[in-house]
Image: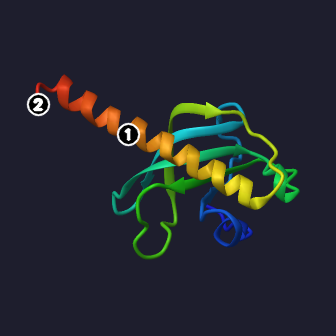
Amino acid sequence: MVKGRGIGSKQTVPTLNLAPGAALLPAWGVYITRTSALKGGQVWPSVTNVGCRPIFGGDELVVETFLLGPLEGAAPPAIRVEFLRRLRGERRFSSAAELRAQILHDAARAEIFFRRLKRWVRSSAGQP
């Protein structure tokens, strides 16, 4: 994990930031993801953006993850992000408020995905 610029916490939503390095990444866009702390075993449903943050004048590739569940205590020093489904491509928004509204909409779509996934796993296991 890397320290971000703190813009999300102040203007949109707080995120955990990864240094993409030479890692294999999907196309730029927003994804439904599952984020795990490498130490401690915590797992969160999440939404992740791969791109350059065009609204904030970004020009370098970043990977930012918004946890859908509560983060208790300090951010984990290392995380693993599993990409499950692409929601949309990265877009430029006219304001931080417009971006925040879109992030919350993406989060709502991800929560529906995780509820359906949970029901599907239960029914596949023969549980009601």
Which of the pair 82/127 is nearer the observer? 127
Q: Position of residue 33 (x, y in %)?
A: 50, 42
First reached walking from the N terminus: tag 2 or tag 1:
1
Mark 2 and mark 1 in contact? Answer it, CB < 8 Å: no
Q: Position of residue 125 (x, y in %)?
A: 15, 27
Placement of 11 over or under 37, stated as above or below:
below
For the point 43% across and 67% down, the residue is 71
For the point 46% across and 55% down, the residue is 68
Placement of 81 over or under 11, stated as above or below:
above
Three-letter amino acid code at the position of disc 2:
Gln
Which of the pair 104/2 is nearer the observer? 104
Q: Position of residue 97 (x, y in %)?
A: 72, 60
Q: Quadrant of residue 31?
A: top right
For the point 71% across and 68% down, the residue is 11
Q: Is residue 53 left or right of residue 79?
A: right
Residue 114, disc: 1
Which of the pair 74/97 is nearer the observer? 97
> What residue sits right under mark 2 in the picture?
127
